[in-house]
Amino acid sequence: MLGCSGSNQDTGNSDMPIDYRSELRRPFALVLAGVAVLGWLLALGLWLSYSNRLQASRAETTGFQQAEVAVRGQLEEQQRTAGTLADLQTRVAAAQREMDQLGQNREQAQAQLTGLQQTFQTIQQQLTQLQNQLRSQSNA
């Protein structure tokens, strides 16, 4: 046991702490660290890109929802207007029929008035003749 001094050098186990400075000077370690940094940068870039796209998508969705609300409001207004328009058209048609009927009644009344005026003139002439006859009989 001359060679045994209690160290683990001959067994291959090392209880010595790892010297990170010397490990980082090795090319493989440098490449591995660089790849890790690039991976983290890529992950950060993808996350930021996804975050921006998500925010843009949410803004676009909000815009679509607002546009939908506006279009629904316009549709409801048009439906109300169409209902009102149909009611107005019905009322106008009824008023037109009533006006046509009133026009016919006016024409009939005008015709009757013309006939009554002629009858009135005839009666007035007859009255004048009777008055003249009465005057001549009372003067005689």
Image: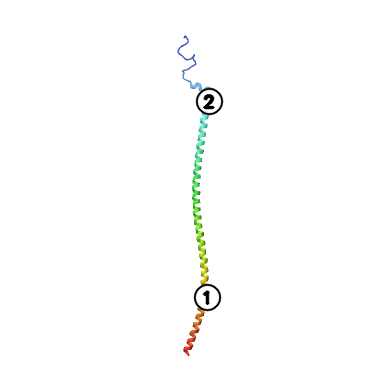
Up/down of 34 relative to 125, above or below:
above
Please report the residue visible at 50 percent of the width from the left and 43 percent of the height from the top: 61
Please report the residue visible at 50 percent of the width from the left and 82 percent of the height from the top: 126
**Mark 2 burial class by Cα count in 10 Å: few <14, some 14-19, many 20+:** few
Marks 2 and 1, the one that precedes in the sequence: 2
Q: CA distance from mark 2 to mark 1?
A: 121 Å
Please report the residue visible at 51 percent of the width from the left and 32 percent of the height from the top: 43
Up/down of 119 relative to 51, above or below:
below
- The image shows a total of numbered marks equal to 2
Q: Which mark is residue 115?
A: 1
Q: In x, y percent, where is residue 84?
A: 49, 56
Kind of element beneath mark 1: helix
Residue that badge 2 annotates: 32
Kind of element beneath mark 2: helix
71 vs 55, nearest the viewer: 71
Q: In x, y percent, where is residue 119?
A: 51, 78
30 vs 127, nearest the viewer: 127
Please report the residue visible at 52 percent of the width from the left and 34 percent of the height from the top: 46
